[in-house]
């Protein structure tokens, strides 16, 4: 999962948008920053989760609850950091929200499917330890990370042309 996270981060930096036949450096930079924040937050929070002393002692239901709480925390952190970053660089609050809402809406199906997988894995008795369950969860999460470049590109395409007005602000990124 951590290797996939790093690969996704690199892959996303290669995405460059074109708007009205010209490079859209603002949209490209905003995408790169959002996904970098997301991947960095995922990596940090999952490392924290794995470093917990109580993982092996958690019940299946508690493991599920704690992991889903971790996912919620990840989303809150990277979305807030991205919003703050965008606005601090001169992107209007409304445009920052549109970008973030577009990405979040596009990823909702993946997120819901992943949470269902977490529920299934944590309550499955074929895994002998919580570490086995977490390994399975991370395998599934790696798949959800793998499709981020495609999802991000498609979600940012929905806001085509909206960000051109910020081209003089791109040096702040």
Image (cartoon, rainbow, N blue to C red):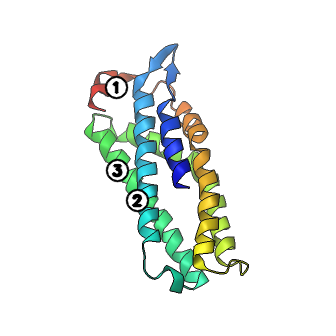
Q: CA distance from mark 3 to mark 1?
A: 19 Å
| Residue under label 3 | 81
Q: Which disc is residue 90 wearing?
A: none
Residue at 50 percent across and 19 percent down: it is 19
Can you tell which of label 3 and label 2 is closer to the viewer? 2
Picture layout, residue 87 above or below residue 133: above
Q: Is residue 115 left or right of residue 15?
A: right
> What is the CA distance from the residue labelled 1 to the residue labelled 2?
31 Å
Q: Quadrant of residue 116?
A: bottom right
Question: Which residue is disc 2 drawn over?
Answer: 44
Residue for point 53% across, 36% down: 11
The residue singled out by tag 1 in the image is: 166
Q: Earlier in the sequence, mark 3 or mark 1?
A: 3
Residue occupying the point 40% across, 52% down: 78
- Upstream in sequence: badge 1 or badge 2: 2
Q: Position of residue 40 (x, y in %)?
A: 41, 51
Question: Which one is in front in this view, the residue at disc 1 or the one at disc 2?
Answer: 2
Figure quadrant of the N terminus: bottom right
Q: Position of residue 103 (x, y in %)?
A: 52, 44
Q: Residues within 10 Å of mark 2 (few under 14, many from 20)?
A: few
Give the camera-side residue of 37 and 137: 137
Is residue 55 positioned above or below 161 on the image? below
Kindly state the secondary structure of the residue where label 2 is placed: helix
Residue 47 in the image: above or below residue 90: below
């Amino acid at each position: 999962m951590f290797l996939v996270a790093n690969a996704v981060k690199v892959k996303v930096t290669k995405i460059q948008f074109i708007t009205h036949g010209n490079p859209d450096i603002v949209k490209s930079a905003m995408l790169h920053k959002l996904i970098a924040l997301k991947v960095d937050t995922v990596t940090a929070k999952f490392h924290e989760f794995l470093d917990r002393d109580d993982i092996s002692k958690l019940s299946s239901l508690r493991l599920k609850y704690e992991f889903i709480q971790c996912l919620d925390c990840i989303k809150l952190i990277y979305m807030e950091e991205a919003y703050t970053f965008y606005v601090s660089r001169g992107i209007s609050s409304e445009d920052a929200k549109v970008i973030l809402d577009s990405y979040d809406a596009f990823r909702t199906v993946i997120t819901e499917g992943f949470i269902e997988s977490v529920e299934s894995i944590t309550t499955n008795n074929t895994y002998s330890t919580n570490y086995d369950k977490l390994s399975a969860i991370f395998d599934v999460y790696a798949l959800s990370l793998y499709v981020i470049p495609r999802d991000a590109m498609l979600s940012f395409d929905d806001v085509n042309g909206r960000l051109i007005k910020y081209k003089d602000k791109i040096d702040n990124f």
